[in-house]
Amino acid sequence: MLELSSADQVFILTGAGISAESGIPTFRDAGGLWRNYRFEEVASPQAWKRDPHLVWEFYSMRRRVALAAKPNAAHFAIAQLDTALKDRVFLCTQNVDDLHERAGSVCVIHMHGEIFKSRCDSCRRPPFDDMQLYDPPAAVPRCDRGGLIRPHICWFGEVPYALDSIFAALDACTVFMAIGTSGVVEPAAGFVAHVRGRARTVYVGPEAPANRFAFSQCHLGKAGELLPTLLQSAVK
């Protein structure tokens, strides 16, 4: 079990592994391919410029998968910790689905964007909620200022969102937890090194991450099976 004091500040980073337990396949599970396209070919600014219809078809597929998925026990355990500790928990996810929110977490930082939000590719209006499936032959929608409406996703080659807030929370945390993340994708893979030596570092996931050496605790197994027990004492 994870013992927390009343002074602890907890940073939680979740990755594709926690969503995979809810039935959302990771890019790696799919062999890095969709309909013979590499994911980089349909999830990049270059792909958007080349063929926005194809990009929207890909994200419409991903929306369908995310809609069919349900939060698992790991999502609910994190939400319970969030409720118990309130502003002493900073929840950051690499995932673009809304499973954390559906489990009850209120403030979730989606550093790679959100699958059910869209934005104009030209103007600076904020992203908006969007559940539509833009499959061909439907036209790619346009903003009333002329730009195309794109998924609110951090594509390959783009800068992740909210990095200032994320690094401020990393600097303040005393406990860092990484759940279901491979330890390969930057900049998230470097978060544990940023806090190492100052904060307790805990990993939970089905297999050891690439940055295993940086964690003081490593709990191998499904997050949905391990987290409810691991966090049990922390939410009392």
Image (cartoon, helix red, strand yellow):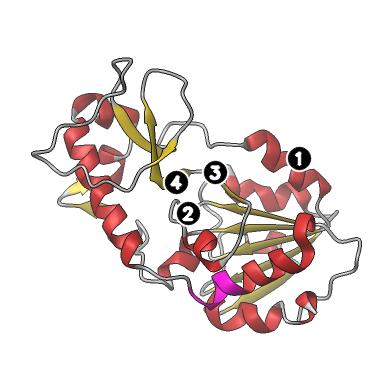
Compute the Cα span from label 4 to label 1.
Answer: 22 Å
Mark 3 highlights which residue?
Answer: 111
Mark 4 highlights which residue?
Answer: 114
Is the residue 139 above or below the residue 184 in the image? Answer: above
- Between discs 3 and 1, the one toward the N terminus: 3
- Looking at the image, residue 202 sits to the left or right of residue 137; the answer is right
* Circle nearer the viewer, 4 or 3: 4
Label 3 neighbour load within 10 Å: few <14, some 14-19, many 20+:
many
Mark 1 highlights which residue?
Answer: 168
Compute the Cα span from label 4 to label 3.
Answer: 9 Å
Quarter of the rendering containing residue 139: top left
Amino acid at dot 1: Ala
| Residue 205 at x, y percent in the picture | 55, 71
Quadrant in which the C terminus appears? bottom right
Majority SS type along the magenta span: helix
- Between discs 2 and 4, the one toward the N terminus: 2
Q: Secondary structure at mark 4?
A: strand
| Residue 188 at x, y percent in the picture | 59, 47
- Looking at the image, residue 91 sits to the left or right of residue 171; the answer is left
Tell which residue pokes out farthest to the front in this image. 144
Q: Secondary structure at mark 1?
A: helix
Magenta highlight range: 72-76
Mark 2 highlights which residue?
Answer: 95
Quadrant in which the N terminus appears? bottom right
Tag of residue 129: none
- Between discs 2 and 3, the one toward the N terminus: 2
Q: Is residue 74 magenta?
A: yes
Instruction: Assess whether mark 4 and mark 2 are in contact (beta carbons under 8 angstroms).
Output: no
Front-most of 38 and 98?
A: 98
Amino acid at dot 3: Met
